[in-house]
């Protein structure tokens, strides 16, 4: 195998990693602010993936076009979930919150299984086999579009948190819960909004993911774990960290799939997680806990 | 010896004693009345009661949330099954080999986590990561047939062979019943020991425990290792009862989730909660399955949705689990200690 092969696989891994990063960003935002571990994250992503697949197979709506509408649907779903079910659990012990979300995850996976069956579904776009040639590197068009969309959504989210007043208010909630209450912020509403934003992120990521891979109901838990691996690797609460973690894991998986066997690739992602927990528990870009 | 008996019975009301004895009598008599289906359901219930108690030692007593207990059951299943199929070594010897390996595995996970301050949810994720690592690893481990699965020879025997764990469902039923009873006794002894009180202190407030001079690292390590070792027997049972092992099933995260549902629904940290939870959950799930079958509905996943809804309802409505509530009703609640 020449260097070209490695380069091609590496580029594909980085592009997929950017979409992973967007998925993990949603988790990071939710945990960073609401302090609830969204263990149904990958399951929420598979909901978005199924919406995209059904829209494509029934109405021939391109996932790239449906990115914003599907993210909006997931936004509403996330808002309702936080406002209706999770908010009363904010002050409960960690394992109690965790189990609530695990229960939700179990219900989502099996509801998808009952509705759509166990078989894999795909989106066959007209550009599925297109590619760009950049010197020796051949870039898969679907992956490039998906990665570009992921970057745009991430940038929008950055801008929202940086420049809008609501974004500032949410950051205030994350920094100091009691302080936010004292200055009169409606914390419950902001939490619901944050969860909704996280859900929208994962919705967008899921929609893009249909361009890259098939969807089955059983994928959910795997993506949840992957999102956690990425977020912990990149550093919890760090938005650039999630993106970097995503790229790192995407790259690792792609190269491991090439050098060893594709089915063993997530072993290497877990290996990275263990290394990070050992040598830099706060993650690559995370701040040391005080 | 006297102190052990005293520790076991101290604080147990006569009523609680009578209820326990009655339950044990019913369970002992069950194989004579129950048909094969009911007996299989009872075996599943007791299996989950056993694993639930094993998990409860770590989470319920010492407060360390593990979501990867499938790894210990998986090691407990694979090691004796491998020794049996490859070298003809009996399951009990295999179990003796599995105990230290499972405990060592728990020790590695515990060491990595507790030494480097990985706690709470991060710890839970680390345990999942290890279980997933094992799942994929065993899926590629050719010495145990990788993803093709490991099969134990099934032989029709005229008599039960307890030493080689080959025999009728009734024999397996008594084996798992004995294991459940032993686990219950062990749990109570542990909880009433010096270590048990240290665990409770760590669970309630780790910093305070450390300030009071408890070597929290050491006792958390003990909790993980004991829990892992106890869990490994469940794997031995699983291997020899079902006679086939696939990494995809044995190490699957849903195995870990199944193990923890019983104690959560029954009552985390209580002695009887894991047993009660296993009965309630499996009983309800089997009823739902047969009810659906009676209406001619065959939905894969319906049972899991039911599990999910049960879990949701219990977490929302009875955060302490069913047992504390039921114990008060039965008048067998121990006074708050």
Image (cartoon, rainbow, N blue to C red):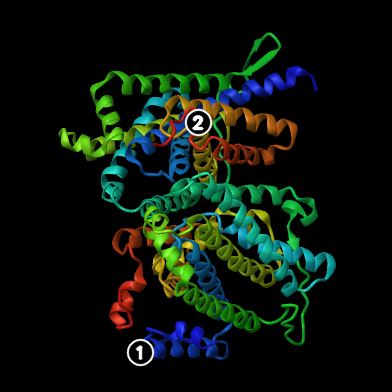
Q: Quadrant of residue B226?
A: bottom right
Q: Residue at x 36, y 73 (%)?
A: B323
Tell me the SS state at disc 2.
Answer: helix
In this rendering, do the residues under marks 2 and 1 share a single chain?
no
Residue B44, relative to residue A50: is it above or below?
A: below
Total numbered circles: 2
In the image, residue A206 lies at what x, y percent? 47, 33
| Residue linked to disc 1 | B15
Task: Read off the residue under disc 2.
Answer: A234
Cα separation, mark 2 vs mark 1, equals: 56 Å
* The N terminus of chain A, quarter of image: top right
**What residue is rendered at 44% in x and 61% in y?**
B307
Query: Residue drawn 49% across and 57% down?
Result: B301
Mark number for residue B34? none
Q: Position of residue B41 (x, y in %)?
A: 54, 75
Look at the numbered disc 1 and give the secondary structure of its residue.
Answer: helix
B185 left or right of B236?
A: left
Q: Which sits in the foreground, A23 or A273?
A: A273
Whether the residues at callouts 2 and 1 have beta carbons within 8 Å, the answer is no
Closest to the observer, A260 or B194 = B194
């Amino acid at each position: 195998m020449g260097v070209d092969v490695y380069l091609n696989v590496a580029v594909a891994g980085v592009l997929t990693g950017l979409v992973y990063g967007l998925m993990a960003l949603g988790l990071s935002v939710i945990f960073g602010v609401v302090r609830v571990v969204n263990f149904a994250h990958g399951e929420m992503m598979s909901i978005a993936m199924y919406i995209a697949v059904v829209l494509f197979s029934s109405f021939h709506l391109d996932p790239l076009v449906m990115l914003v509408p599907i993210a909006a649907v997931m936004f509403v779903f996330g808002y309702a979930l936080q406002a209706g079910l999770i908010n009363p659990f904010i002050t409960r012990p960690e394992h109690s919150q965790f189990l609530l979300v695990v229960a939700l995850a179990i219900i989502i996976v099996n509801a998808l299984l009952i509705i759509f069956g166990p078989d894999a579904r795909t989106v066959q776009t007209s550009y599925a086999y297109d590619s760009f040639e950049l010197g020796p590197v051949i870039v898969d068009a679907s992956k490039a579009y998906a990665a570009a969309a992921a970057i745009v959504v991430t940038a929008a989210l950055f801008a929202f948190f940086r420049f809008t007043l609501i974004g500032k208010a949410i950051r205030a909630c994350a920094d100091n819960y009691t302080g936010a209450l004292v200055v009169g912020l409606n914390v419950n509403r902001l939490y619901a909004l944050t969860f909704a934003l996280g859900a929208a992120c994962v919705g967008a990521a899921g929609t893009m993911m249909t361009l890259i891979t098939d969807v089955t109901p059983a994928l959910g838990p795997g993506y949840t774990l992957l999102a956690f691996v990425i977020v912990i690797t990149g550093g919890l609460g760090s938005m650039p960290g999630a993106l970097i973690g995503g790229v790192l894991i995407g790259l690792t998986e792609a190269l491991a799939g090439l050098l060893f066997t594709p089915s063993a690739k997530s072993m290497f992602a877990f290996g990275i997680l263990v290394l990070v927990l050992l040598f830099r528990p706060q993650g690559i870009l995370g701040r040391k806990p005080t | 010896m006297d102190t052990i008996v005293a520790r076991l019975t101290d604080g147990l009301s006569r009523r609680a004693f009578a209820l326990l004895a009655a339950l044990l009598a019913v369970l002992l008599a069950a194989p004579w009345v129950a048909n094969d289906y009911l007996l299989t359901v009872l075996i599943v219930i007791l299996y989950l009661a056993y694993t639930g108690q094993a998990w409860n030692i770590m989470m319920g007593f010492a407060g360390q949330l593990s979501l990867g207990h499938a790894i210990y059951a998986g090691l407990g299943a694979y090691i004796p099954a491998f020794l049996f199929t490859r070298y003809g070594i009996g399951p009990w010897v295999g179990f003796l080999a599995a105990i230290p390996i499972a405990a060592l595995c728990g020790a590695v996970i515990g060491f990595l986590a507790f030494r480097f301050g990985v706690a709470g949810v991060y710890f839970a994720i680390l345990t999942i990561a290890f279980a997933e690592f094992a799942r994929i690893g065993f899926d590629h481990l050719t010495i145990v047939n990788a993803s093709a699965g490991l099969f134990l020879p099934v032989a029709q025997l005229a008599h039960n062979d307890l030493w080689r764990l080959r025999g009728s469902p009734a024999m397996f039923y008594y084996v798992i019943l004995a294991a459940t009873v032993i686990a219950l006794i062990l749990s109570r002894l542990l909880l009433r020991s010096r270590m048990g009180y240290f665990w409770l202190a760590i669970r309630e407030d780790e910093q305070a425990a450390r300030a009071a001079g408890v070597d929290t690292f050491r006792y958390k390590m003990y909790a993980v290792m004991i829990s892992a070792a106890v869990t490994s027997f469940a794997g031995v049972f699983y291997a020899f009862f079902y006679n086939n092992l696939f990494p995809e099933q044995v190490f699957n995260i849903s195995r870990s989730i199944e193990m923890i549902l019983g104690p959560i629904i029954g009552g985390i940290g209580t002695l009887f909660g894991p047993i009660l939870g296993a009965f309630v959950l499996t009983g309800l799930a089997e009823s739902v399955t047969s009810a659906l079958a009676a209406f001619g509905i065959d939905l894969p996943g319906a049972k899991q949705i039911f599990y999910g809804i049960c879990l949701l309802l219990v977490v929302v409505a009875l955060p302490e689990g069913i047992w504390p509530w039921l114990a008060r009703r039965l008048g067998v609640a121990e006074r708050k200690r």
